[in-house]
Structures are given as C-alpha cells and as structure tokens.
Image (cartoon, grey):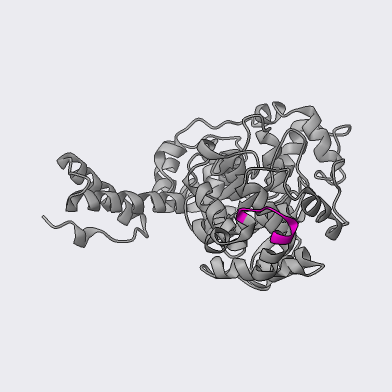
Amino acid sequence: MNNMSKIKIIKTEQDYQEALKLVEELMNRDPNPDSTEGEQLSLLSTLIQDYETRTLPESFPDPIEAIKFRMEQGNLKPTDLIPYIGSRSRVSEILSGKRQLTLDMVRALSDGLGIPARVLIRKPELDENAEYETWDNRLVAEMERRGYFGDASMEKSKKSELLRAFFSSVGTQLKFAVMHRKSHYRSSPLTDRHALDAWAVHVFKKVQKIEMSKKYKHGVVNLGFMQELAKMSTQENGPLLAQEHLKKNGIVLIIEDHFPKTYLDGATILINKDNPIIGLTFRYDRLDYFWFTLMHELAHIALHFGQDISLFYDEIENVKGADMNSREKEADVLAEEALLPKAKWEVSPARLIPSSMAANSLANELGVHVAIIAGQIRHKGNNYVYLSKIVNEAKVRKYFPNEKWNK
C-alpha cells in the first residue's frame, strides 16, 4: 500500500484527524526507521507536530485560557462565541470563570473552533493568584522600581493583582510562551525563571511602542547579512547603526538590563512572525560582548525561525559544552563564523601569537572592530587574560544613555 499520496501539509482539523489515523496504521506495522514506511512515519510525525504547534500551545492552565487563545488567534469577539456557548450573558459568565462549560458547549467548541475536547474538559483553575503569590517580593519590588507596573505599586495593590495585570496586557500567546515554557533556556540552574519571564514581557511591551513599517522576510538573515552587519562595528556609533539596520529589515532590537539572580545576556522572541525581537541585557559593558551576543540571537533567527520554539533565553558566556543543545551549538558556530571566519582564523598569525598587533591586523583584514577580534582570540584560546586592555576599554552602554543600569 502506497501511503505517500495521502501525506500532505496539514491545514484543517480534518487533515489532522486523517494524519493521526495514518500514523496509527503505520505504527501498527512497526516499520524499520530506514524503510519507506519508516520515513513516511517520520514525515507524518513532523507535519502533525507542526500543526499542533501552530494551532495550540503545548499546555494550557485551564480551558478558559484555551478559548481566549483561540479567540486571539482567530481575531474573534465574545459575540462570536454565542453559537457555541449560548447567549451573550452566558459567554460572559464562561469567559470570566463564573460558570463551567457544559458537555454540549465542549462539543460545540471542539467542533467549531478546533479546540481539543481534552483541553476543554479540564477543571478550570479559577484562582491564578496562587501562582503569583509564589513570586519573590524582592523581584516584584525591582519590577516596580523599573516602572513595570506604571502608576500601580505594592503599597496600593496586592502582588497578585500587579502581576496579573502586567502579564494580561501582552496577549495570551506571549503569556503562554513565557509562563508555560514554550521557550528554550540556555541559562544557569540558579537563574530565577520568574525574573526571566518578567524581563521578556517588558521587552515585548517596549516593542509595542515602536512603529514598524517593514515586515521581516524569512531568509533575509543569513551569514552574509550578519557579516555585513558586523562591519558597522568599526564606526563610532556602530551599535546604534546596527539597531537601525535591523529595524529596516523588520527586526526589533531592544535593550533591557538583566535582573538580579539572572545571568541573561540576550533573548530571541519569535511570537510575532512579522517582526522578530532580539533583547539584549548588556550584562557586561563590552563591545565584543555586544556583537557576539547580537550575532548569536541573529543566528537563532537565521536557523530556527518558523520552528517550534517561540522564545530563546541565552546566557552566552557561562554555559558551554555538555550544557548546550544542538540549537545553541548551531547558533554559536554561525555567530563565530560571522565575526571571525574559521578559514581566516586557521591561517592567521593571531592564532599562534595573541598580540595586539596580530589582532589589529586581522580586524583590518575582516573590516570589524579590533575588540571583536580580541574577544574571539580570548574565547578560542580559552584564555581571558589575553588582550584585556583592548576588550575592557571598548564600552557599549554609553550608546544607550536612557537605559537604567544596575550598579
């Protein structure tokens, strides 16, 4: 039996159900992974995972949030739910958590909006305050100090109220990515994950204030794009030029200082496919660090845009070797190639003699700032004593004087 003719891109719920049946048929035959049927099974599994990723997040705190997610995804208003739930007042009661879904509502919503019944029949978590109460008071106080809550404060409002309002203002999709782990962490086990979530949401809020006239075109960011961007480093206001150049290509670069108890260097947020977001913390006030972290996040866009991860959190300098997964290794390799191509490094005198003269010569040859090359020499030689003067004197925070830095 030839199943290849039945395999196609999954666009509808019917396509999804047909694919599941075909997978079941193939699995019952227990095919060899290298056989034709084994390859078909692998392809089908990928298509199913892609459809599930596009249509629903991996997990929901309760069925009401699942409905709200589908409404946001389909640009639906509460009145659009009347055919599935009943009257306008009944819709209001369901969405506010005052009334539970009936079996008829579950069936109607599952058939009409494609929300799996297994999600809708879960018991609603009517009180999400319990989650917010676990947040460290010192973290919430720091968020208040930074102005994350606007005019609200811990003195006038409960911690849970502040946090609920803070997260609800960015939309369900990002909330799921940061709070329900549709994200990838490359960070220390000591990192306060709540702090990372607060940081990412605030970065997203900063983006909402920026007018973007250009949409990102998939494939624009590649090795050549990154290498040309790196050449801006030789100009006095290179970081600002890079920020503007990225904006012209539909990518938003946001600067936001890291929180205490986090070691975050940068993040890539791919929630909005029209405008990918890169957030940098400037945890180290060094130009070489800025350019490598920027290249690492751009590498995520070049390599992983449109895949199953919506948010990458990256601690660049202290997570190495076995602690990295394949995505991070790929991003590191591409970032290093953009700044100092392997072919150039292999034949450079700087590889044998890490002197300032050799660093300057290689930087001039590649058309990038000498601090970038000095940083790469230190990294590749695993010796961070080399060229300290060049690295430490090239600062980056000065280009962003309006940011508030932790001392």
Along the line of sight, which residue is nearer the eye, 359 or 170? 359
Q: Name which residue lies at 34% across and 58% down.
A: 10
24 vs 371, left or right, is: left
Q: As drawn, which residue projects farthest toward the left? A: 1
Q: Is residue 355 magenta?
A: yes
Which x, y percent locates residue 34? 21, 49
Which x, y percent locates residue 345? 57, 59
Q: Name which residue lies at 79% across and 34% down.
A: 140
Q: Quadrant of residue 363?
A: bottom right
Q: Would you place residue 349 above or below residue 32 in this image? A: below
Q: Would you place residue 2 above or below residue 42 in this image? A: below
Along the line of sight, which residue is nearer the eye, 327 or 247? 327
Q: Does the magenta stretch include residue 143?
A: no
Q: Name which residue lies at 46% across and 54% down.
A: 54
Quadrant containing the C terminus in the rendered view: top right
Which x, y percent locates residue 400? 84, 58
Total labels drawn: 0
Is residue 276 in view?
no
Which x, y percent locates residue 177? 58, 45
Along the line of sight, which residue is nearer the eye, 242 or 224? 224
Is residue 112 in view?
yes
399 vs 263, left or right, is: right
Quadrant containing the N terminus in the rendered view: bottom left
89 vs 355, left or right, is: left
What's the magenta region?
351-358
Q: Name which residue lies at 82% across and 68% down.
A: 236
Along the line of sight, which residue is nearer the eye, 59 or 30? 30
328 vs 121, left or right, is: right
